[in-house]
Image: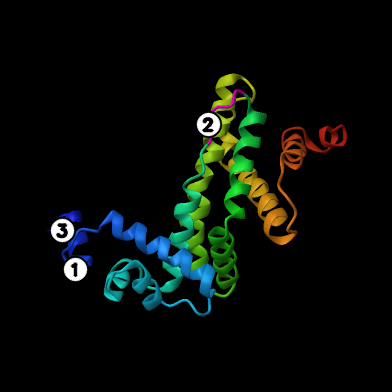
Amino acid sequence: MCSSSTSSRRRTGGRPRSAEADAAILEATRAALVELGWSKLTMGDVAGRAGVAKTTLYRRWASKNELVVDAVAVLFDELELPDRGSLMADIEGVVLQFAALLERPETKTALMAVIAESTRDEPLRERIRASIVDRQKRLVLAGRRRAQARGELPANPASATGTDDLIFDVIAGAVVHRALVSAEPVDAQWVQRFTALLLGGLAAAART
C-alpha cells in the first residue's frame, strides 16, 4: 500500500508542486482573461505567460475551467475579518473589502466568466461552490462566533449551519448584484444601510 504523499507524487509526474509556479500560473491566467476574454484564453497562452510548459498546467489542472476557478479563488482567499469591536463594524468592513476586490479588473472579468460558463457546466458549478463559495463561508462563521462571544448574538447551535448559509447568500448576492450587475457603487453609505437592513430587518432600514 502506498502512502498519500507517494500517490500524490505519482499523479504529478514524481515532482513536488512549486508554490511559486502555481502563483505565476494563476497570475498569468487572470492577466490573460483581462486581455483576451474567456473565449480566446487557452492553456497554451497561460503557459507562455507564466514561463512554464503546457504539460505543467495539465498536471495541475485538467481544463481551462478548473484553472480559472482556482485563479479566482485565491483572490477571494485574501478577504479577512479583523475584529472591529462590533458585529456591525465587522460586517461593514468585510463588505467594503469584498466590494474593493470586485472592482479589480482581474476579479471582475474572471468571476463573470466562470459564472456565465457554469450555467451550462455542472462540474464547473460544483468547483465554484467548493473552491470559492464554501471556502468563504468561513467569514460568516468567524463573525457569528465573535458576535456570540461579545454577547451580541444568542448562541443557537441547532440552527447555525442553515443561518450561516443564508447570511452568506444575502451578503454575497447583494454585493455582487450591486457591483457587477447594477454597476452601482458599494460605498460606505450604501454599506451602512445594507448592514442596518441585515442586522435589524426592514423596520430598522426604514429608520436610516
Sequence-earlier tag: 3 or 1:
3
**Disc number lying in front (2 or 3):** 2
**Disc number lying in front (1 or 2):** 2
What is the crowding at mark 2: few (fewer than 14 residues within 10 Å), some, or many (at least 20)?
few
Give the residue furthest to the right: 206
Query: Residue sitting at 72 percent across and 37 percent down?
Result: 195
Give the residue furthest to the top: 151
Q: Specify the segment rendered in magenta.
A: 81-85
Q: Are marks 1 and 2 in contact (CB under 8 Å)?
A: no
Please state which amino acid type lies under the numbered disc 2.
Pro
The residue that label 3 is drawn on is 6
Q: Position of residue 159 (x, y in %)?
A: 60, 37
Whether residue 123 is visible, yes or no, is no
The image quadrant that residue 94 belongs to is top right
Query: Residue sitting at 51 percent across and 57 percent down?
Result: 129
Q: Most prominent secondary structure in the magenta stretch?
A: loop
Disc number for residue 82: 2
**Disc number lying in front (3 or 1):** 1
163 on left or right of 121 = right
Q: Would residue 17 be counted in the magenta stretch?
A: no
